[in-house]
Image: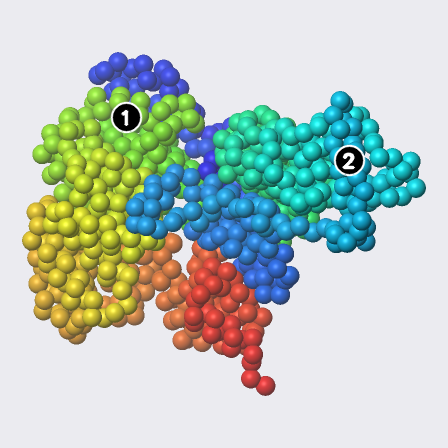
Amino acid sequence: MRTFFPSESCKETQLNALNPESWLQVERGKLSKLSSQSSSSSIESLIKVPEPQILPYFKPVDYVEVLAQIHEELESCPPQERSSLYLLQFQVFRGLGEVKLMRRSLRAAWQKASTVHDKLVFGAWLKYEKQGEDLIADLLGTCGKCAQEFGPIDVGSQLPLDINVNPHECVSMNGNQVSTNVSFRVGDEKIVCDRQKISGLSAPFNAMLNGCFTESLCEEIDFSENSISPSGMRAVKEFSMTGSLSEAPLKLLLEILVFANKFCCERLKDACDRKLASLVSTREVAVGLMEYALEENTPILAASCLQVFLRDLPNCLNDDRVVEMFIHAHRQQISIMVGLASFSLYCLLSEVAMNLDPRSDKAACFLERLIEFAKTDQQRLLAFHQLGCVRLLRKEYDKAKPLFEAAVNAGHIYSVVGLARLGYIRGHKLWAYERLSSVISTVTPLGWMHEERSLYCEGDKCWEDLEKATELDPTLTYPYMYRAASLMRKQNAQAALAEINRVLGFKLALECLELRFCFYLAHEDYRSALRDVQAILTLSPDYRMFEGRVAASQLRTLVREHVDNWTTADCWLQLYDRWSSVDDIGSLSVIYQMLESDAAKGVLYFRQSLLLLRLNCPDAAMRSLQLARQHGSSEHERLVYEGWILYDTGHCEEGLRKAEESIKIKRSFEAFFLKAYALADSSQDPSCSSTVVSLLEDALKCPSDRLRKGQALNNLGSVYVDCGKLDLAADCYINALNIRHTRAHQGLARVHFLRNEKADAYEEMTKLIEKARNNASAYEKRSEYCDRELTKADLEMVTRLDPLRVYPYRYRAAVLMDSHKEKEAIAELTKAIAFKADVHLLHLRAAFHEHIGDVLGALRDCRAALSVDPNHQEMLELRSRVNSPEP
């Protein structure tokens, strides 16, 4: 979900909000007046820490158990239930914030869909998730590869005709009966038909023409009052003779459809259904035809119209006619439209509606329908919780409470957060505190529980809860922000910055950057404030600060007036310094500033994308890559960026092709580098190393700046190490260090280690730690080159700097296991698994469970791990072993 759910304010002692409108009116040169006041009130005017969001997600207390249950059910369930289970798996991963795993689950739901309706809904959902990726499809097209993976479905071919042929139809269709004619008068015209052919259309016609009705004796029957035109009746006659409908205008087809329904002509109705479905091409046509489809019960036409709507998400939800149809269609009509996939449909619609505006009427209405179509407890608790979140946002407190209660009663403990907020709003602060305390004492406590309880207490109790929240889940940003703001309010700026830097060291959260911007602003450090606001704008160009009231770009304009301008040469020197010191946020800021000049923007956007990838911001990195392509100054440069776009989206072969096309036009550093990088990453053939070496050498012969040449030398050194050519590798790394490519220390350390020079390796990594601003990975690597006690110290530092790195937990757990401290070893892994779904952590814990004879625990972790990575070979082997223990 792309939007967040801001919470209601429930802490009177929160820091006061800045009035940005008046602040923006400060004249040039007078900003210092605002921040030069030393009183804490002036600092508070700049700082506000919003309460933690109530996320509208499925957040089970033990997600491992839920994933394991889903995996077990997937192994034995009927095919028609698989898509729903993958949708539930998607919801679990969304609650964990695992975007890649979410998409993989959606893809699995689409791939395993057993009905056209499931295929249609999940195909549209995947298309919606891939918004903005049209360029990738276009680039694949230039390589001769079709990218319409989730293209429109031919609904008619997926829904075959299923009509039982009655005895009267057999007689009418065998052609052996002697036929007599019958005429149907429509107005002034008379249409002569074969009596037996018409009677074969349906049981009512057979009874009329061959039964005991008066019409069976008539040679002419008046059909003027049956809502059929002469043209329509002639088309019916033709169908009775040929079994097919010729080309007919839309209006006539609708007329025939109504007629076929009236006289139960199922084959004629099916033919109309398919013909009409083939005419659905635009939303406007679909809106008009859906009404007929639901009224006349034509599932192919209904599904075809639905497909047009869903493939037009989110735009179609701005059409009131479409929204009204989804809101007011009754259950039978929904069944006609989407078969048994009604819950999946409203899951998608409510997701899109909440992304557009979580407070909107349509979001609330779609969620009400989601509750209506929920079949399992897990579906119900999700729907109740999401609607509760929307009702809370809309300040419909009386409606929100029973929804959160229903979610909690269905087993969703996280919904107690909604109840606690509602309790506080109504003045029941103590009740909210006690409700959270009850949860903490009855289930395995998680970080969000202590974070939430901290809102309902003061002083030391609040601080203790926030510390516990960080201990249990260091990825929660609110505790860091609250502590940092409190320290700033006490005039302890150094400690405040250290606290907010803790989280920014491993999680580039916009709200944390915004808070640090405020800290720098309050202390007149405008250069640092400018750095942070420019980093914010790089990540989110439309970001608004101070609770959405001021555009970040406006604040940047104001702050920049108090900072000396850098020339282009100054900017390149600053970028070089920051890149060399592994200061990625600082580098981003410098590039943002350089993009305002007349410099080659393609190159700068490309550098920006490299930094964003390093900072684990793949969406922003892809946006920068596309901008690099857009601003490329030549065809060969654009081809390189196109190659990187394809490579980064998993199309390695096509990326290589783009590199080769670029080289044919002009031999350039970036083209050779791309080709070498993609080849080294994709080829399993050891002999390709010589090709990669040759490509990198060619790259180094081409003009480029020292930042990129240092990277090429570093990569070349890595290839030489893999080939056992340590002297050549060392030369590469030393040359890279000579042009201040700081990360080359790590490669040189590896060479020392392979030469059995462990002390030199340790020393080399120490140099990297001293130079690099972001150095968690350096501590982790250095831990491999020292004795156990120093290793433990380095890995403890890694966990403090970046708690998302999993190797330290695995190492500590392995040491405990070697010391026969099985419970402590499992606890060490469990601590990390609680906030990070990682296959390596789950694999190791499963092995520990197997070792101590806990078969059920091992099997649970195996299943959960295979939900994260279904093709993990060691995990598959372990599960097989656990599943079939020796007698």
> Which of the two residues, 491 or 791, is positioned nearer the viewer here?
791
Residue 354 in view in this figure: no
Find numbered disc 2 in the image and state the secondary structure of the residue it sits on: helix
Q: In the figure, is residue 766 to the left or right of 144?
A: left
Mark 1 nearby-residue class (10 Å; few <14, some 14–19, many ≥20): some
Name the amino acid type tagged 2.
Lys
Q: In the figure, is residue 799 to the left or right of 351?
A: left
Q: Can you say whether 786 is above or below 745 in the image? A: below
Q: Residue at x 12, y 38 (%)?
A: 572
Name the amino acid type tagged 1.
Arg
Residue 76 in view in this figure: yes
Q: Tell me where residue 368 sits by quadrant.
A: top right
Q: Tell me where residue 207 sits by quadrant.
A: top right
* Image coordinates for residue 519, horizontal then vertical, percent: 31, 32
Q: Residue at x 31, y 32 (%)?
A: 537
Q: Which mark is residue 262?
A: 2
> Which of the two residues, 696 or 566, is positioned nearer the viewer here?
696
* Image coordinates for residue 798, horizontal then vertical, percent: 32, 57
Determine which residue is flagged by label 1.
556
Estimate the spatial distance between the alpha carbons at disc 1 and disc 2, rounded to whole Å: 68 Å
